[in-house]
Image (spheres, helix red, strand yellow):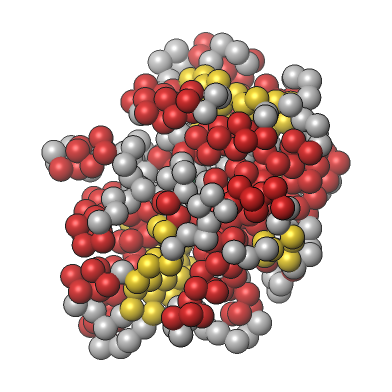
Amino acid sequence: MPTRWYNILADMPTPPAPMLHPQTRQPLTVDEMSQLFARGLSEQEFSRERFIEIPDQVRDLYRIWRPTPLVRASGLEKALDTPAKIYFKNESVSPVGSHKLNSAIPQAYYNKVEGIQHLTTETGAGQWGSALSIACKHFGLDLRVYMVRVSYEQKPYRKSVMHTYGATVIPSPSETTEAGRQMLAAYPNTPGSLGMAISEAVEYARTHENTRYALGSTLNHVCLHQTIIGEEARLQMEKTGDYPDVVIGCFGGGSNFCGISFPFLRDKLAGERSTRFIAAEPASCPKLTHGKFEYDFGDSQGLTPLIPMYTLGHDFQPAAIHAGGLRYHGGGQIISQLMKDGWIEAADVQQLESFQAGVLFSQVEGIIPAPESTHAICVAIQEALRAKEEGIEKTILFNLSGHGLIDMASYDRYFAGELS
Ligand SMILES: *Cc1c(COP(=O)(O)O)cnc(C)c1O
């Protein structure tokens, strides 16, 4: 298992524009960020150090399930009758079933060592909330999760997972914050949104003693932690004798895509490789393929710093697709700059084609993917079929960000023809 995370900020030819303080509109400082996030995480957010040592206590917990398998998808290759070699990195084997734990553990750790006792966060479908719940339990922190109301009501199992790990889960918008009360007064029957839940979690952390906030994607320190995926994959690919021509990840706020990509992108930035990197996003929330590059907030109320990024607007309300983890309006600071400079590409995928890909993958590889991960599988299949048409061998690597065993209601609705 690698001992360091990779910080791509050290190698970007065009550094991203700074994040701005939401009130002063001046470049955000580490001190300002530390009022909301642990200082260790705020320092990582701005760091230009190429490699950052993974603390021992974090590595001990990573060892519960890491390294994760790198798998040759021979069943999928056969089903597609493609000359391409397809590999996937299986992040679904983590105790919570997704890559989210890779960042939840260090986030809980840095808060703990600084003496913080309470954390708040938000969760959409519940993947991030589940991961942070067990991470907080490992370090003896108390956690309050604002869960988007529609998911709280329609996806009860992840709420049960969070309860089991000992977290407090509150459907958002709620009466427990000013932001929530305002939202409920204006829209009594609102299903809630991720942006709304972030506003509540941020407000609660700001107004309570010894409390900090944690975010599961988009920010630089989250992408940094996720590079454990790609660092491992590099070592594993070396053993196969292959090197990926294409690297693919699904894209919500960017963390798993960054995680699998950045360690390989390092070689491309150094001029040693010409690998393509494809972010697979849902057609219903296409910030990289159809968004605008501008300063925008990370939440719906404008409480977070302004981030220079591809965005659909912080008040964008995506359709209620079943890949809940991909329904985020912005692409984050690093990815957006890399996209603008042409180092990575993006592809958008329709919901029905994503489920079709997910069902094929389930049947030939035996792992039922999360609805989010099916987007990456779909683009990997498209690339493999193109290789077949063109009669060229190529090596495809995608990240299987999670399994879908708690999302079977979504598969049921797909089979019943109820999805669009
Ligand atoms: C949260 C989640 C995603 C999307 O988040 P990113 O930060 O873009 O990785 C993708 N897949 C799964 C399984 C998730 O839980």
Query: What percent of the width, then of the height, locates residue 332?
Result: 60, 52
Q: Is residue 289 above or below residue 167?
A: below
Vertical arrangement, residue 145 with respect to residue 370, above or below: above
Q: Quadrant of residue 342?
A: bottom right
On screen, residue 389 above or below 114 = below
Residue 196: x percent and y percent? 54, 28
Determine the residue located farthest toward the left in the rendered image.
416
- Name the residue: 33% across, 78% down: 85
Specify whether residue 340 is in view. no
Q: Residue at x 29, y 75 (%)?
A: 384
Residue 184 pos. (x, y %) = 51, 14
- Evaluate whether residue 102 shows in this view: yes
Between 309 and 215, the one nearer to me in the picture: 215
The C terminus sits in image quarter: top left
Q: Determine the image quadrant of residue 230.
A: bottom right
For the point 31% across and 80% down, the residue is 84
Q: Quadrant of the N terminus?
A: bottom right
Vertical placement of 396 versus 93: above or below? below
Residue 420 is left or right of residue 251, and the answer is left
The image quadrant of residue 161 is top left
Indicate left or right for 14 with 200 as reference: right
In this rendering, the count of numbered labels is 0
